[in-house]
Image (tube, rainbow, N blue to C red):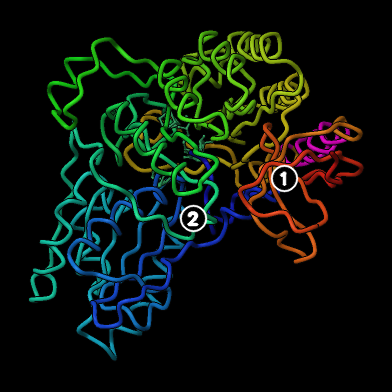
């Protein structure tokens, strides 16, 4: 869950992230008489996925979506708190909406997501223009809160649930290419990484009914989609048990046995051989050989693992409370290489300049990167978040210039590694799922191979959603270029 937007401490090294760096806006609706909803999402894919649930809930109440906020009756910002910059971006955006509201006071402006959860009623006080503050587990209450806000009563609901998974809600796909879609398989996070705000903004971890996940995947396949990404903060700890199933009573079907992540992957892979399955994020402490063997067994489970290390030094990992050390991480990477081979894509998240990190410890991060040879990484410098374990226990003592310099070294390393890894693909042929035209030219098409690499090739009348075999003849650090063969 790492694709973040408009967050300037993130540095891109791959086209795939550029796509996620746009603020995604709801699609243009058709019913002109309906009240109009404009929704904008920030942060990770979980948030983008939640916006699709929110849209579904409000569409049932007669709302239509618009991509033009000036035409909207209700403006919702689905926000992120992961770093300070992410929150600043939202505050700037709220200031812009403030101007609109001053000439059009009847519109309702709401803050959803992680900032809503973190700041709760404070947001109403701080940002006078906000009418609604709704946390990630309270979206079913939105129709009621919107109604009240329209009558002048500002509302806050930041109740965090132990059960809510929105399993019965069919998301309305926003900004969809009609080929790839995200499916939330769980919510919340029970890990307490000391730097991270997510357990506070998203609450306890809970897994969604596997049948509702499989049904969603099947429905997407029948609508023409050819790839699903199963989303969770730590997909490897997905677990559905009969007791939980009975408790939630969301589906009539009963699951008799415990379903773990490997079982779920298999269930989704069996929907159709032409439906690709991806997942994110894997936690190094929990990823099992069983998952790796399941990936190997099914051609349609993509050979790509996002396995955030955060640091390459065991002492830093310990104070980050990641609950694994460098050796454990390396053991998991070795397992990936031995079970799935060199071609399996591996990516990471890295944090530069965490509290007390020494120069040598930073070097350990660079040497881990050399060992793993990541295809891609999301790289950040540490940003202290109020209320987290690190904020309470450790001083944020690495000066900004040093954080930035270390981050730059990590980025330079990743650029070199991405190019090195992509060069190994020259001369190879990959099965590519076409996602649409290339961003740079309508004469070219763009898709991805199993390892999640963007592949560009000439448009000879192929359609998006089709699979083609592409032989790679050139590359940059971010992209492979090839020709369709056969
Ligand atoms: N659940 C995922 C991560 C979700 S947050 C995992 O455990 O890997 C996405 C990424 O943001 C994290 O992997 C981390 O690299 C980064 N991040 C989280 N908190 C941060 C902070 N306080 N400062 C800088 N980066 C942070
Ligand atoms: Fe945050 Fe750690 Fe949970 Fe990831 S696993 S969301 S980094 S607490
Ligand atoms: Fe995602 Fe940001 Fe929340 S990364 S879980 S939207 S804090």
Residue stretch in magenta: 410-423
Please tell me the numbered disc located at residue 85. 2
Q: Nearer the viewer, residue 462 or 391?
A: 462
Q: Report x, y in % for residue 402.
A: 67, 42
Q: Are marks 1 and 2 in contact (CB under 8 Å)?
A: no
- Residue 166, placed above or below residue 326: below
Residue found 83% across the figure and 55% down from its top: 458
Q: Under tag 1, what secondary structure?
A: strand
Left or right? Give the position of 450 relative to 484.
Answer: left
Query: How far separated are the C-alphas under marks 1 and 2?
Result: 28 Å
Q: Which residue is mark 1?
A: 454
Residue found farthest to the bottom: 103
Q: Quadrant of the C terminus?
A: top right
Identify which residue is drawn at 24% across, 82% down. 33
* Disc ID at residue 146: none
Q: Sort mark 2 into few (<14), some (14-19) or many (20+) by Cα contacts within 10 Å.
A: some
Q: Position of residue 182 (x, y in %)?
A: 45, 43
């Amino acid at each position: 869950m790492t694709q973040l937007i408009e967050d300037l401490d993130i540095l891109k090294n791959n086209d795939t992230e550029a796509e996620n760096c746009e603020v995604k806006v709801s699609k243009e609706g058709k019913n002109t008489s309906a009240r109009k909803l404009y929704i904008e999402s920030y942060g990770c894919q979980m948030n983008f996925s939640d916006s699709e649930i929110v849209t579904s809930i409000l569409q049932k109440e007669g709302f239509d979506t618009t991509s033009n906020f000036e035409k909207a009756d209700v403006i919702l910002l689905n926000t992120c708190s992961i770093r300070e910059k992410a929150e600043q971006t939202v505050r700037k955006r709220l200031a812009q909406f403030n101007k609109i509201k001053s000439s059009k006071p009847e519109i309702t402006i709401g803050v959803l997501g992680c900032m809503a959860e973190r700041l709760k009623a404070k947001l109403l006080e701080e940002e006078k223009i906000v009418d609604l503050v709704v946390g990630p587990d309270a979206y079913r209450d939105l129709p009621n809160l919107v109604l009240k806000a329209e009558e002048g009563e500002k509302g806050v609901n930041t109740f965090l649930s132990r059960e809510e998974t929105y399993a019965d809600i069919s998301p309305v796909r926003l900004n969809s290419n009609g080929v790839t879609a995200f499916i939330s398989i769980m919510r919340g996070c029970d890990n307490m990484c000391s730097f991270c705000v997510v357990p506070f903004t998203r609450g306890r971890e809970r897994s969604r009914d596997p049948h509702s996940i499989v049904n969603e995947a099947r429905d997407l396949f029948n609508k023409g989609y050819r790839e699903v990404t199963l989303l969770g903060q730590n997909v490897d700890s997905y677990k559905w048990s009969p007791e939980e199933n009975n408790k939630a009573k969301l589906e009539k079907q009963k699951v008799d046995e415990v379903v773990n992540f490997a079982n779920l992957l298999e269930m989704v892979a069996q929907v159709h051989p032409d439906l690709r399955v991806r997942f994110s994020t894997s936690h190094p402490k929990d990823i099992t050989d069983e998952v790796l063997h399941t990936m190997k067994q099914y051609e349609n489970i993509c050979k790509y693992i996002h396995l955030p290390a955060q640091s390459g030094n065991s002492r830093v990992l310990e104070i980050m409370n990641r609950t694994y050390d460098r050796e454990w991480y390396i053991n998991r990477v070795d397992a990936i290489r031995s079970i799935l081979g060199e071609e399996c894509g591996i990516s990471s998240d890295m944090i530069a300049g965490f509290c007390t990190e020494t120069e040598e410890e930073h070097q350990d991060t660079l040497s881990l990167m050399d060992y793993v040879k990541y295809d891609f990484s999301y790289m950040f410098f540490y940003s202290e978040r109020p209320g987290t374990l690190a904020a309470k226990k450790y001083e944020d003592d690495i000066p900004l210039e040093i954080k930035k310099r270390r981050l730059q070294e990590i980025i330079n390393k990743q650029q070199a590694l991405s190019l090195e890894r992509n060069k190994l693909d020259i001369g190879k042929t990959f099965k590519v799922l076409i996602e649409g035209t290339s961003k740079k030219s309508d004469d070219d098409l763009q898709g991805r191979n199993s390892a999640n690499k963007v592949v560009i090739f000439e448009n000879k009348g192929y359609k998006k959603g089709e699979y083609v075999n592409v032989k790679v003849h050139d590359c940059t650090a971010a992209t492979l270029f090839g020709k369709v063969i056969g």
